[in-house]
Amino acid sequence: MQFIFNNKIKAVLAVLMLLGVVSSVFAFLDHASHGQRFWSNFLIDGFFVFSLGLGALFFLALQYATEAAWSVLLKRVFEATALFIPVGAVLIIIALLSGTLHLSHTYHWMLEGIMQKGHENYDAIIAGKAGYLNQPFFWLRTLVYLGTFIAFVYIFRKRSLLEEVASYKGSVKLSAIFLVLFGVFSSTLSWDWIMSIDTHWFSTLFGWYVFAGFWCSALIFMLVLTVALKMQGLLPNVNDSHIHDLSKWVFALSFLWSYVWFAQFMLIWYSDIPEEVTYYQERFGHYKVLMLGVFAVNFILPMILLMSRDAKRNYTRIIWVSSIIFVGHWLDVFLMITPGTLHEKGQVSFVEIGMFLGFVALFVWVVLQNLSKAPLEIQNHPFKEESEHHHF
């Protein structure tokens, strides 16, 4: 069965993308921030949608590595979501180039003379990190990350479309290589692209924290997309047990994210080391309600509303609860970036919401376009029959 990307859906997404463009113009023309508001939101939304594709690629590789059978009927959803990575890579490059070209002040360590002793911008702490935080090495790492992710997503997709047993076995072996690389890159890219915004600060848990957030967000999107396709009658062999399993992943990852959030905060608060607590002083000083609200939404909501078996199979509840948690994780990325770029001047207004909707609309457009390019169900997978009889 083939998914048809119809004109009604395209029209809605086009309107949302237009809203994103209009909101971007307002952000760029914000005189108080001298354009920084635009670049801050661009990085927030660009990273958020890129990370959805990256989370899907990781989950797809995980299914291959573990030779999971239950998810075979959902592979096309995982692939279509992961195939956003090339577009997301362009967004990431644009956001990072704004710092390199001094169009924004997102990355303080990129300022001219910041590591040159005697210069008026000299910062001894940042200069001490010059071995890692220098632009040639930074861009080399970035291009390696993006090149690796793009290569693997296309390799997995090509092998999947062949639908041969030999191709599947090859993907199992490749997934092991990818997961090793991902284990390193998922942490280092979070240090490079996000943690380096607060250049004086560091956390050994930050990579895990970012990873837990985007993995959960990706699962939320793929769950909602699967439910939407199922409700349209497009995935006839997908049953409530498949939906239940995806819901369990969202439920479990919400707790993983909450655990890492609290672990990072608690250890820094308890040790009370000056160079570490500055991160939370900035956020609790100006964004306390939002900070605690995001934690409450992403922890308490799934615990209360997605715990029972029936809740994990109730399509209506899944959609609205997942949508709220999804926005909660976007706000989490907002809190990672905004206090370091706009300090106390950050806000969530129609501009931020409009840009968020525009980027998400672009993401959904690309995903649905990819979804329409191949049959929704894999036909010759060795575990297809087992997936069709997945019941509990």
Image: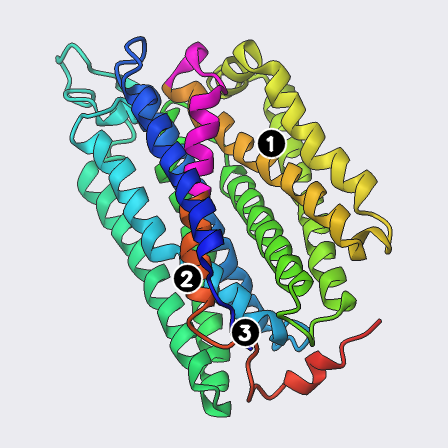
The residue positioned 57% from the left and 46% from the top of the image is 217
**Residue 247 in the image: above or below residue 383:** above
N-terminal of the pair, mark 3 or mark 2, is 2
| Direction from residue 6 to residue 379 in the image, left or right | right
| Residue indicated by mark 2 | 369
What amino acid is at disc 2?
Answer: Gln
Percent coordinates x, y for residue 46 in the rendering: 38, 40
| Direction from residue 318 to residue 281 in the image, left or right | left
Q: Which mark is residue 292?
A: none
| Direction from residue 206 to residue 105 in the image, left or right | left
| Residue indicated by mark 3 | 376
The verdict on residue 343 being magenta is yes
Region rendered in magenta? 342-360
N-terminal of the pair, mark 1 or mark 2, is 1
| Secondary structure of the residue carrying numbered label 3 | loop
| Residue indicated by mark 1 | 264
Percent coordinates x, y for residue 320 in the rendering: 70, 42
Q: Depth check: 140 or 163 in front?
A: 163
Nearer the viewer's eye, disc 1 or disc 2?
2
**Residue 244 in the image: above or below residue 218:** below
**Residue 263 in the image: above or below residue 212:** above
